[in-house]
Every structure is written in structure tokens, then in C-alpha cells.
Amino acid sequence: MSSNPATFPSSINSPTRNKLSKEKLIELGLIAIASTSILIVGLIFLFIGKEAAPFALEPGLGALFSDTWAPTSMMKESFGILPLISGSLVVTLIASLIAVPFGVCAAVYIAEVATPLEQKILKPFIELLAGIPSVVIGFFGLIVLVPFIKAGFHLDSGLTGLVGGILLALMAAPTIISISEDAIRSVPLSYKEASLAIGASRLETIWKITVPAAMSGIMAAVMLGIGRVIGETMAVLMVTGNAALMTLNPLESVRTMTATIAAEMGEISFGSEHYRALFCVGILLLVTTFGLNIVARQVLKKYRMGA
Amino acid sequence: MSTVVSTANQQSRPSLQFRKGDGVKVKEAFLYGLMRGVAYSIVLAVAFIIFDIIIKGLPVLNWEFITAFPTQSGAAGGILPAIVGTLSLVGLAVGVALPLGVASAIYLTEYAKQNRFTDMIRLAIVTLAGVPSIVFGLFGLALFVIVLGFGASILAGGLTLACMILPTIIVATEESLRTIPQSLREGSLALGATKWQTICTNVLPYAVPGILTGSILAIGRAAGETAPILLTAAAFFLPALPTSVFDQVMALPYHLYILATQHPDIAAVRPMQYGTALVLLLLVSGINIVAIFIRNHFREKFRW
């Protein structure tokens, strides 16, 4: 060995160099794969935009700002998306009015009041709710809730924005609860101790110290929940009756943006104005949920929460 | 964290008894009761939905129901092709998304530096997680069905679902990789192992439960989604099982949607609706419950 020192380094060096280049290759491969997320997002914006773009030339974006959605009318086709926006607005408002107070209250209870045993019961149920497919929730709403609302309000049809909003509240609740709960738990213990030490009760501490301190996280949770509500399709498609009315009355039938795409895309020819108009609705949905998501995640980032 | 908070709660509990007057106590008791009521009302709603579907679906559920083709446009017979269709869509979606998702997560936790590129990947994942399912459907229609020429098929639907579940898998894998202590990596590196060897032998094996949980949740989501496959893969009735990935398929959620909203004979089809809903619920919730169990089991086992 000592007689030929020159071979010593090289015999170690060559496999090491091989290993190094193999390591480099693996890292490059991983970078490439990690970039697929960027690629997919790019492709989504590109393809939805590409299919919608011709609508801006003919008949022009102005056609979208009308209050009549009658894309298959024999007399005169009309692609006004305002009734679809009002439909989405109605169900979203109802869902928020129910899901936000319920969700925040439940999150506070789970994070601050519930015993470990209660948590073990409550949390799996909430996860189970998050996992129920939207089509099953829609089916349940159609069979159970629609007749109930019809009888309760003496309506001709129970297929209303109200039922859609209630179902969406159910679907937004798990998001709102779990993210709010994380935010509430991340409030430093010292805040609570200080409050209790100066004689505040536990309840006062919860609502006047802990919840305000977690407020930005709770707001983010609400935004993510609303994002889910706006994008939800099947449940609203099944229970809202889908009449494209320009209304804010929760006891009337409404047609949301998502339901419109799902109901109509199957029956039209590719490349028609109607087809382009539905992609325009898709862009509006994409941009709205994108905006809500980005703002919410920015807020959560401050908490350094992964959610 | 949770144990710390709950002990603090228990310590503070006696302080309730030293409050100003009885009026305050009554009010507090009422408010606690209200919060408890709200929390448990959600449990009640979930239980109600699940029991309604189990009780009305169970009488329909038998061997014939899950192994026969539908007849009388869904009012009789079984749902075999819908089950097969859903399984093939989910299989393809997970087969594509799992390797991509795990590799992305490995890059993000083990290699990525704090720079603009990493920020962009993270932004893309967050964006992807928030895209509405019907927009995924539009995307799949425009790219896979039309431009790539797959037509409405298992391939187009499976790839669309894969895009949708990718962020779930990445986030779950990342979380489980992060919980593995740095010392395990350092020990391996100190013995002369390369970074990749360290990841393969000392990191990934311990992350398997977390990866499994994440991918099982993703499977549950993919199996239950209707909107993306509505535009890219699903057919209401097909006389034969699919033979290649370029075939259209029936799918459980789509079958339920059609039976619930498009079938003229409401009375005859009602039991079949409940049966289909139950099979779908059993499939998805069963998958989710397995995931929850795996996670809880290993959370106890690997405590660093």
C-alpha cells in the first residue's frame, strides 16, 4: 500500500465522484418532479384561459354583464352571468351565516373546554364529516332537507338557495373548525395565565383574550371555508333547483356558477359560444378562490402554521 | 400542546367557584352549555346523515347488488360497473400522484433552500389545493379530453383526479418527514452515507405511516369526487366493463347523482339510490377511518 500511494486517493476518488454525480442526478430529478405542481397550475390557467379567450372577441366580454342567462334560447342567446353570481352569493352568504358562528364556537369548545375524552369523540366526527362525498350530502339534502323546507315554509318547491346554503355550511364547517382550532391552540399560554391571574374567569379569558389573539387565524379559516363553499358543485347542483333567477331571496331557486358548468357542459358542442361562456365562468371561479386562498395562507404563514 | 392546555384548564377550573355571584355562575353555565351544544350538534348532524343512509341502504345491499349490472336504467339490478369504474379511476389517480407527491415532498423537506423557486413551488401547491373541483373538470376537459385526444376516458379522468389529490399527498408527506428528528439524518451522514442513502434508509421508512395516511385520505377524496369526472370520464350506463384506459366508465358518485336527479320513476329507484349512497359512503368513510387509525397508532408508537 505504502509502495504505491498514488493509487490510494484515486481508488477512493473515483467511486466518490460517481456517487456525487449520482446524488446530483437524483437531486435534479427531484427538482423536476417538484416542479410539476408549478406546471399543473400553469397549465390550468393556460387552458382555461385559452378556451375562454375567444369569447372576449366574439360576442365580447360585455355580453357577460347582463342579467339573463339563456344560453340555449331559440330567440336570442344571452350569456349574462350576473344571475349565476347572485346565485353563488345567496348560497355562500347563507352558508357563512351558519358555518362561521357554529364553526368558531365548536373550535373554541374543542380547543379550550373539551376534556381529552370529548376531543377523542368530537374530532373524528369532524374528520368524518370532511370525508363525506359532496354527492352524498347533496343526496341527503334532496331526500330529507328539501321536503322539510318545502313543508316548513309552505313552498311550491323545496329546491331553494336555503337548502343549498345549509348543506354548504355542513361542508365548510370541518375546514373552519380544524384551522380555527389550530389558531386558538397557538395562542401563548402566558396570555391566558395573565388573564386568569388578574381574576378573569375562564370564560372571560376565552372570549376576551384567547379568541381575539387568534382572530387572524380564525379569519383565515373562514376565508378557506368560504373558498370551499364557492367552489362546491354537486351538493348545490342537486338541491337548488337551478333556475337562473336574479334574486337574493333564499326561498327561491338559484343557479350557482359551479352548478351551471356541471349541468351544461355535457350537452354542448365544443368551441361554441356557450362553451366559451362556461369557461369564462370557470375563470371567475378560479380567480375568486385563488384570491381567497392566497390571502388566507399569507395570514396563516404569520402563525407559521402549515395548514 | 394539548396536554399543556388541558392541565391549565383543569387548574383554572376551581377559580369558577370563587366568582362574584350566583347570577354570573348561571350565565357562565349557560354559555358553556351553549358552546357544548353547538359542538355536539355537528356530531349529531353527521350521525344523522350516516344513520339515515345506513338504515335505508342496508336492505338493498347484497351480493347481487355489488356484482350485477344495472337494469331498467338503474331502477333494478346492481352497480358493479360503477364500483369497477371508481376503483380504476382512483387506482390510476393514486398511481400517478403518489410517486410525484412523495418525491416533491422529499425535495421540499430535504433539499430545497429558502429561495424564490421554493416559494413558487409552495405557492403552486397552495393554489392547487384551492382550485374548485369543477374547474379541475374544465381543465381536464380542455387538456386531456380535447387537446391530448384521450376523449372521455379512464385516462383523462384519472389524470384529472391525480392533479386534484397531488397537494394532499405532498402536504401529508412533508408533515411526516418533518417530524423525523434531525439526529437520525446526522447519524447516517456521520457514518459516511450520502444524502440519498440517508433518505432511503433513515428517513423514508419512518415516514411511511404519515405518507400512508395522506395517500389514504387522498384516495377517499378521489373516490368521492363527482365534478371532475363528470366532464372527463363518466358515463351513465355502459353495457360492459372497461377493457382499456381509453374507455369511458361508470362511477359510483356519478351514478348516485344521476339516479337522484335524472330518473323519472322516483319511487322505484329510491332503494337503489340509498344502496349506491351506502356503498359510496362505506368506501370513502371506510378508507378515511383506516387512515385515522393508522395515524393514531403511529402517533403513539413513534414519539421522538
Image: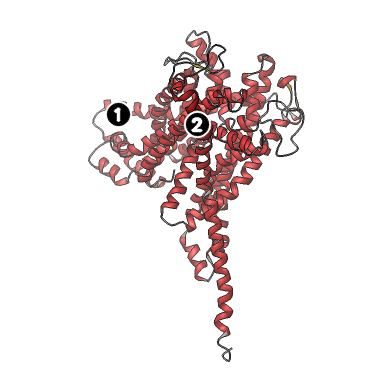
Is label 2 or label 1 in front? 2
Dot 1: chain letter:
B
Residue located beneath label 2 in the image: A53
| Residue A81, x across and y down, in percent | 46, 21
Residue located beneath label 1 in the image: B25
In the image: residue B266, left or right of residue B170: right
Where on the picture, by quarter, is residue A269?
top right
Mark 2 belongs to which amino acid? Answer: Ala
Q: Residue at x 29, y 46 (%)?
A: A190
| Residue A80 visible from this viewpoint | yes
Discs 2 and 1 carry the same chain letter: no
Classify 10 Å Cα crowding around label 2: few (below 14), some (14-19), many (20 and above): some
Mark 1 belongs to which amino acid? Answer: Lys
* Nearer to us in this view, A186 or A201: A186
* Nearer to us in this view, B64 or A69: A69
Dot 2: chain letter:
A
In the image: residue B1, left or right of residue B148: left
| Residue A195, x across and y down, in percent | 26, 40
| Residue B270, x across and y down, in percent | 66, 18
